[in-house]
Image (tube, coloured by chain):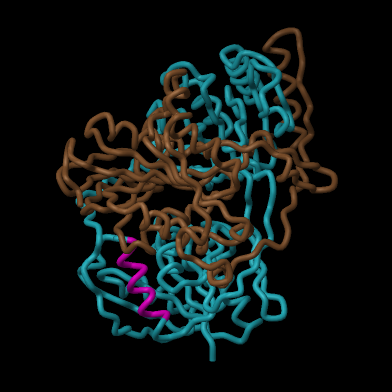
């Protein structure tokens, strides 16, 4: 239950240890995508979710628990969430979860959140930077039977309900929901803090628990049977850009050259 | 006979999905159906009936505002009643939420944001962009039904008349889990970014809001519109929409990026532009790798010079 300001509120924040797409190398000739070699980091928008959770904590003295599903390396992302101010973290890591779809992963995360229990609010990023399906948040809400409000750029929590402004293509909606509820946030909601040295030191002493499927009373075969979507191929598209750098003595000369080029392209006449 | 069910809260997008749906329906021998939810739906239903075999309407006061979970519940009712094997949903932000909740309710797979969609020997093949636009992923889904969401403007609108029947679907509508208390409509620019043939886009290199006037002048000389990267809209609040992974995806004939470094998330929104011009002080800015014409320089010098050069051209 939601106890209001300062009394036992528990916020769960879901974070993904995602492929750092900026550092991902692709071969434009062969189309090969070096996913396995790419560095990973906390998905950008999940950082906003952690920040929002920590800000709620600063106002309400609530407890913030970070949850992630991924390989052992996802501990790094969870440590970062702890350094930002989360109190404890859970990593659901099981070899059998690899290559399963969002339906399955959301189910396992929902089971973990159920086991943690007593939550008032679940925060997620609107989508992860690598997959960017935007499906996870609402899916987790559905498994848990909760209302969700997605694409939130402003959030207010009060006694037993939340009011959120959500940013859609053609409008901003103000939406209310009773807690417990799930929120997905946009990058516009806040500016995530950079963890302090103190925060980083404190994080190493905070509890980080790793759960396997059996800890959630789940069987690998049952879980795998839920998964419906499979990836057949991942390939880099060929980028055909001219890559001409226009140089000149003066801005005027450069501008003239550009205009000439655009006329040749048939863009301007 | 099996069915394909189309849903989008945007009529335009529903028509595009019916366009693709028509192609698939002849391939897998299925009826093409579309759902319309809300209040006063008869006009929309008539429009869509032209291009579908059946239109299912669910009219209820509780559906006046789009509470996405409730919409998903109603669509679940339709799915259980009519057993479509493929469900196509428009990938607007609301559409993705609906698809996400619906597919979880049905415990079936969902492929989000498909840009290509084929059936080969009864097997679905869908392509979607991943890793911020650096790669395309070919996926399949084995569940029945299966759900695919498709972004606006990916497929051509339906053009073959089917003159289908409109059916009032008897689906119970319960209370929503959320309450939308206010809808603030955004100011929509006269020319939509997605439709513009020329976009002059500004990024963090544009220091002040009034400096966008300069970009506007350039844009108007090229009969285009002004756009921006995410931080300009979301962090600085100078615009209501932006170009990028979490914003608009554009494909103009000419895209001029001014003071945009070219983060992968921005590239994802403009990579389909025909010709890209990049103006940036930093020669290392990643935008140059995505540019046909790169200018390493100060946009405050270069942009006015381009404006002058264009004016001279017009005079001569």
- What segment is highlighted magenta in the picture? B68-79
Q: Which secondary structure type mostly characterizes the magenta part of the structure?
A: helix
Is residue B179 part of the magenta span, yes or no?
no
Please count the marks in the image.
0
User: Where does residue B131 sit, x and y in percent of width and height?
Assistant: 63, 45
Determine whether B229 is above or below B3 in the image: above
Q: Which chain is cyan?
A: B
Is residue B77 part of the magenta span, yes or no?
yes
Relative side of A42 to B264, left or right: left
The N terminus of chain B sits in image quarter: bottom right
Frontmost residue, A180 versus B218: A180
User: Where does residue B27 sit, x and y in percent of width and height?
Assistant: 66, 81
Q: Which chain is brown?
A: A
Residue at 40% x, 26% y is B236
Say if residue A137 shows up in the picture: yes
User: Where does residue A216 sit, x and y in percent of width and height?
Assistant: 45, 60
């Amino acid at each position: 239950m939601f106890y209001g300001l300062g009394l036992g509120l528990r916020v769960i924040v879901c974070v993904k240890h995602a492929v750092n797409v900026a550092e991902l190398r692709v071969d434009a000739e062969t189309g090969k995508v070096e996913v396995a070699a790419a560095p990973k980091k906390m998905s950008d928008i999940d950082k906003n979710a952690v920040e929002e959770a920590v800000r709620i904590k600063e106002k309400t003295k609530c407890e913030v628990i970070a949850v992630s599903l991924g390989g052992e390396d996802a501990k790094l992302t969870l440590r970062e969430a702890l350094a930002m101010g989360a109190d404890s973290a859970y990593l659901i890591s099981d070899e059998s979860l690899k290559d399963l779809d969002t339906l399955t992963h959301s189910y396992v995360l929902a089971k973990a959140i159920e086991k943690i229990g007593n939550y008032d609010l679940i925060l997620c990023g609107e989508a992860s930077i690598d997959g960017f399906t935007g499906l996870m948040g609402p899916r987790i809400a559905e498994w848990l039977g909760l209302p969700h409000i997605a694409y939130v750029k402003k959030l207010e929590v009060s006694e037993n309900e939340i009011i959120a402004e959500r940013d859609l293509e053609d409008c901003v909606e103000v939406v209310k929901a009773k807690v417990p509820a799930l929120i997905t946030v946009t990058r516009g909601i806040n500016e995530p803090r950079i963890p302090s040295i103190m925060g980083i030191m404190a994080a190493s002493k905070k509890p980080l628990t790793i759960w396997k499927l059996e800890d959630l009373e789940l069987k690998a075969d049952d879980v795998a049977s839920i998964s419906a979507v499979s990836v057949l191929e991942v390939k880099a598209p060929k980028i055909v850009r001219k890559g001409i750098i226009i140089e000149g003595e003066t801005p005027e000369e450069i501008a003239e050259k550009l205009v000439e080029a655009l006329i040749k392209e048939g863009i301007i006449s | 006979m099996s069915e394909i069910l189309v849903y989008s809260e945007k009529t335009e997008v529903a028509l595009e999905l019916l366009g693709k749906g028509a192609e698939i329906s002849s391939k897998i021998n299925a009826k093409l159906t579309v759902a319309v939810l809300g209040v006063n739906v008869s006009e929309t239903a008539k429009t869509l009936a032209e291009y579908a075999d059946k239109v299912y309407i669910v009219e209820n006061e509780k559906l006046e505002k789009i509470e996405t979970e409730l919409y998903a519940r109603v669509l679940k009712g339709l799915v259980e009643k009519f057993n479509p094997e493929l469900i196509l949903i428009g990938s607007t932000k609301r559409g993705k939420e609906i698809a996400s909740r619906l597919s979880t309710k049905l415990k079936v797979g969902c492929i989000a944001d498909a840009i290509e969609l084929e059936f080969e020997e009864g097997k679905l093949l869908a392509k979607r962009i991943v890793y911020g636009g650096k790669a395309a992923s070919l996926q399949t889904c084995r569940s029945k039904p299966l759900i695919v969401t498709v972004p606006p403007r990916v497929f051509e609108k339906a053009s073959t008349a089917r003159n289908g029947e409109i059916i009032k679907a008897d689906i119970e509508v319960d209370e929503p889990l959320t309450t939308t208390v206010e809808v603030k409509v955004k100011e929509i620019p006269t020319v939509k970014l997605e439709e513009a043939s020329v976009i002059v886009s500004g990024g963090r290199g544009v220091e002040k809001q009034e400096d966008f006037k300069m970009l506007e002048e350039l844009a108007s000389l090229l009969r285009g519109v002004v756009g921006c990267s995410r931080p300009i809209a979301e962090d600085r609040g100078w615009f209501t929409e932006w170009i990028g992974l979490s914003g608009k995806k554009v494909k103009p004939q000419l895209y001029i990026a001014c003071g945009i470094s070219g983060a992968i998330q921005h590239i994802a929104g403009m990579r389909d532009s025909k010709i890209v011009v990049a103006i940036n002080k930093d020669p290392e800015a990643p935008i140059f790798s995505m540019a046909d014409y790169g200018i390493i320089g100060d946009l405050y010098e270069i942009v006015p010079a381009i404006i002058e050069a264009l004016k001279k051209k017009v005079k001569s």
